Amino acid sequence: MRYLKWFIRWINNRILAIPGRVIALLFVAALFLFPLITTESYFLRILTLTGIFAIYAASWDLLAGFTGQVNLGQAAFFGVSVYTASLLNIHLNLPIWATIPLGALAAVLIGLLTCLPAVRLRGFYLALVTLSFPIILNGVVLIFTDYTGGELGLSGIGRLSESRVTDYYLVQIVMLVVVFLMYKFTDAGSKMVRTALIFHAIREDEITARASGIDTTRYKMVAFAMSGFFAGIAGGLYAHYMRIAGPSTLELIFSFQAILWTIFGGIGTIYGAVVGVYILYPLIEVMRLNPLGEKIQVVVFSLILIFTLLFMPQGLSTWVRDKIEVICPRCKTINIWSRKKCRSCRAALHLEKRDWQSEKGASNDIDL
């Protein structure tokens, strides 16, 4: 009984009291309840691919949003994992629980290889160098056609499961677990992993971080490796779900899609990439059902991004969060926007900066 009361108190204080986490909880519940509403294969396919691409977009956000290493060749991580998992399954007949992790490890190797230019290059120059990796790998695919299938790609890859519904639940569960791991890995307030603060320092001023004694090269390698690993997980899932592996997974436009999804949802948040994918990808796919929608989908997609950059430059998820949450200026506790006093320290919220400084000075006088 005591543990039940503790659990209820924890749910009330850590989840239900924070609007953003309530929305996340409702989102997870909607994902699990969706197959109970419809089992139409078309809609299950869209949401399954959405879950895979959410992992892929969040992996780019982990690298670019938190360390400032703008990677325009994220498709290289995804595509290498797709081909590695496919070849291992076709030629060695390995099961999915082996091919997907091995594909992710192959993506880690590409991530470390991509990191080599990052040791000496930054900003625009690094972005241009990373842009070349998908092009090189695409050329390799077209050269070694006996192994990669060339332009036709590979087919006959093993299924994730025997049911579309099982595929859906498997991908969504993996997506939630992987996104949670990435979120904790980049959370500056996490007590388990302390790399987030170093990532932030590298993003804001790498020279100052290096002068402070931080081994920036090592931590950039960690960021590239982690980004490659999680993008590789997405690539392995994609290969076994679609049961094909083609050069389209290495196209430059696929790298830019991860960037656009993340910018729309909110860069530097992890969950913003998930929001962007779950809104934009199903929207564009559903538009294809209409002949007119299929013709104007690129225009609609572009207008949405322009609107976002003009009116919500930090992304949709960040804009919504700022509208429904307020952080206590004294204890930094997250409160719902409608509260007048903090739920932890009872300090007044929504104070003007001048009022808060005067209140802070008064409290310091009392302490003296």
Image (tube, rainbow, N blue to C red):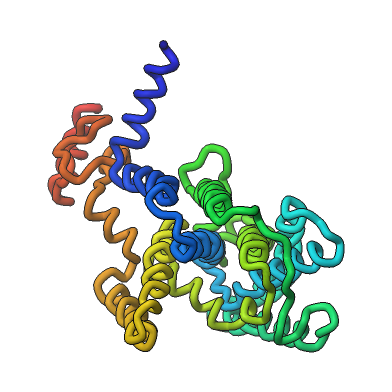
In the picture provided, is 8 more to the left or to the right than 158? left
Q: Can residue 147 be seen in this view?
A: yes
Picture residue at 74% right of the left edge, 59% below the top: 105
Which residue is at the far top?
1
| Residue at 16% over, 38% down | 348
Please state, as top left, top right, bottom left or bottom right, where the C terminus lies in the image: top left
Against 139, is 333 above or below? Answer: above
Viewer-proximal residue, 3 or 193?
3
* Residue at (62% x, 80% y) in the render: 248
Up-down: is 36 above or below 69? above
Q: Nearer the viewer, residue 360 or 190?
A: 190
How far across and how far down the image is residue 300, in percent?
Answer: 32, 81
Nearest the eye: 65 or 143:
143
Q: In this view, does 15 lie above or below 119?
A: above
Tally the marks.
0
Question: What residue is rendered at 38% in x and 72% in y?
Answer: 286
The image shows residue 191 at horizontal and vertical percentages of 52, 37
Is residue 224 shown to the viewer in this render? no
Q: In which quarter of the image is the N terminus?
A: top left
